[in-house]
Image (spheres, rainbow, N blue to C red):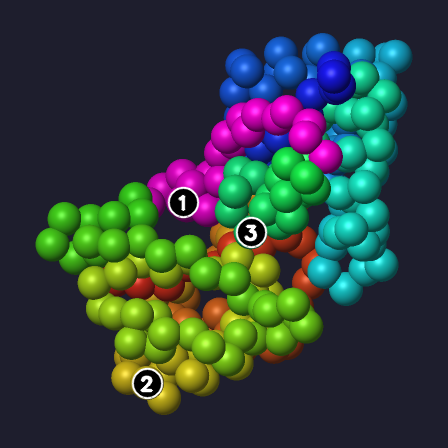
Amino acid sequence: MLAGFVSFVGSGPGDPDLLTLKAVKCLQKADAVLFDDLSAGPILAHVRKEADLIGVGKRAGRTSPDQRHVSRLLVDCAKLDQRVVRLKSGDSGLFGRLEEELLALREAKIPFEIIPGVPSACAAAAEAGIPLTRRLAARRVQFITGHDIKGTLPDDFNMSSLTDPMATTVVFMGRRTFPDLVERLIAHGLPADTPAILAEGISGSNQQIDRGPITEIAQRLNKDGGNLPAVIFYGPLLEY
């Protein structure tokens, strides 16, 4: 019977102070750590020197490891009877391609655990000084991805949901596609002056938070897409 074990650890937005105690303990005991680009830097200081560090990060617009290759690496390391940490940015279960890796482990009959992390959306809202919900004004929060498997804006959005005036919407990985999304939103009735926030590099030294109506945020992204990790908010409670 295999003695290997995999821990999926959510690293939060990048600030090591936002790691959970359980995440830190797990990193300190690991024999191998497969980490994303956004989970690198000071977070890896918690890993013991003897552990293997394997970068498997994915960044928009850059060459990155194939997901099947990452899943195979996880299985191979665990079959060496290692304590493996799969370190993912934010929370592993939010647009982190967690399911593919879980399926590979289940097929290989390798045990695992999932340690949640602070989602980048929650960290960004905290840095912006706003709640994600507001009584009587924003009764619902929805998280969406800004691109599909081809890197383009998904064409199967529920637009009535995305234009709900009582919802706060958070767009992950939408830096390049948000201008197109805004056109669709306005065409489906969302007011052009709906407040929005562009949060970049959250919890890092180059953190930047910009506020304005959705059309203004879209224009900024059209002029300069940038390359920092970003989340975009729009909805009724995002005053600017």
Return the disc, 2 or 1, that comes first in the chain's sequence: 1
**Compared with residue 185, is residue 88 higher up or lower down, i.e. above or below?**
above
**Compared with residue 14, is residue 238 higher up or lower down, i.e. above or below?**
below
Q: CA distance from mark 3 to mark 2?
A: 26 Å
- Extreme residue in the bottom direction: 187
Label 3: element kind? loop
**Badges 1 and 3: C-beta atoms under 8 Å apart?**
no
> Badge 1, how many Cα within 10 Å: few under 14, some, many 20+?
many
Which span of residues is magenta-colored? 108-130
The amino acid type of the residue labelled 3 equals: Phe
Q: Which residue is denoted by mark 3 in the rendering? A: 95
Q: Which residue is denoted by mark 2 in the rendering? A: 188
> Badge 3, how many Cα within 10 Å: few under 14, some, many 20+?
some
51 inside magenta stretch:
no
Quadrant assignment for the N terminus: top right
Return the disc, 1 or 3, that comes first in the chain's sequence: 3
Residue at the (25%, 48%) spot, across then down? 133
